[in-house]
Image (cartoon, rainbow, N blue to C red):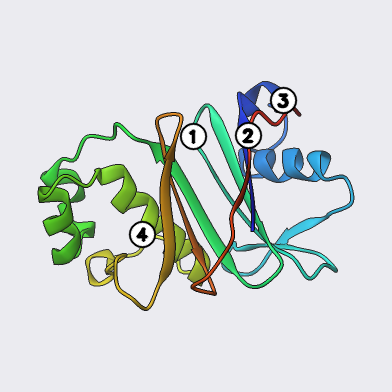
Amino acid sequence: MEIYIIEDWKSKINFNEPKENWATNIIERMFDRIQIKKDARGKPYIVNEDKFINWGHTDRFLVIAFSEIGHIGIDVEANNIPYDESLYGWILHEQEKDKLNRGTLFSEIWTRKEAILKFTGEGINDNMSDLNSYANEYNVISFSFNDLSISVCSEYRSVNLKLYTSVVL
């Protein structure tokens, strides 16, 4: 699996385009031989390719994941998202709350959940606390990079990650 981290990605946006197309247009320009569409649930796919794609972004970074071996989901957030029980308590599974109480960053838990939901194509829903992002049924890898929390959910348990940073558009 290849992961590309693009810094200051918004400097390359055509702000006259609809916001929901910004990342897609940048990715299609970066990898000029691909065309991206979205299915009925909004999950992106590459037209006429046997590769899978997903991405996430912050204001400063765009993170893109490609896989040739199965579906993927990826999410990225700043490491410093403060946890507020009144805002976020409804989304956490009991095991995730336990991890949070033992020092796991809320950003890691959130990106794990989002990566799973992007992998499945479900998106954020009212039953988020039922989803335990640390359950063995999910293949999630989480790591930190440049004060970011990044999580990738893949179809297969054993995945090699190739990380490309300082990518120039």
- Residue 84 lies, with reference to residue 7, above or below; the image says below
**Structural distance between the alpha carbons of marks 2 and 1:** 15 Å
Asked if labels 3 and 2 touch by Cβ distance under 8 angstroms, the answer is no
Where residue 54 sits in the image (x, y, percent)?
A: 61, 56
Asked if labels 1 and 4 touch by Cβ distance under 8 angstroms, the answer is no
Q: Quadrant of the image for the C terminus?
A: top right
Where residue 127 sits in the image (x, y, percent)?
A: 27, 69
| First in sequence: mark 4 vs mark 1 | 1
| First in sequence: mark 4 vs mark 2 | 4
Disc 2 packing (10 Å; few <14; some 14–19; many ≥20): few
| First in sequence: mark 2 vs mark 1 | 1
In-front residue for pair 131/145: 145
* Residue occupying image coordinates x 64% and y 59%: 1
Q: Which residue is mark 3?
A: 12
Asked if labels 2 and 4 touch by Cβ distance under 8 angstroms, the answer is no
* Disc 3, SS: helix
The circle drawn on residue 113 is: 4
* Disc 4, SS: helix
The circle drawn on residue 165 is: 2
Where residue 17 sits in the image (x, y, percent)?
A: 72, 34
Asked if labels 1 and 2 touch by Cβ distance under 8 angstroms, the answer is no
| First in sequence: mark 3 vs mark 4 | 3
Q: Amino acid at mark 2?
A: Thr
Q: Amino acid at mark 1?
A: Thr
* Disc 1, SS: loop
Q: Amino acid at mark 4?
A: Lys
Q: Which residue is mark 1?
A: 58
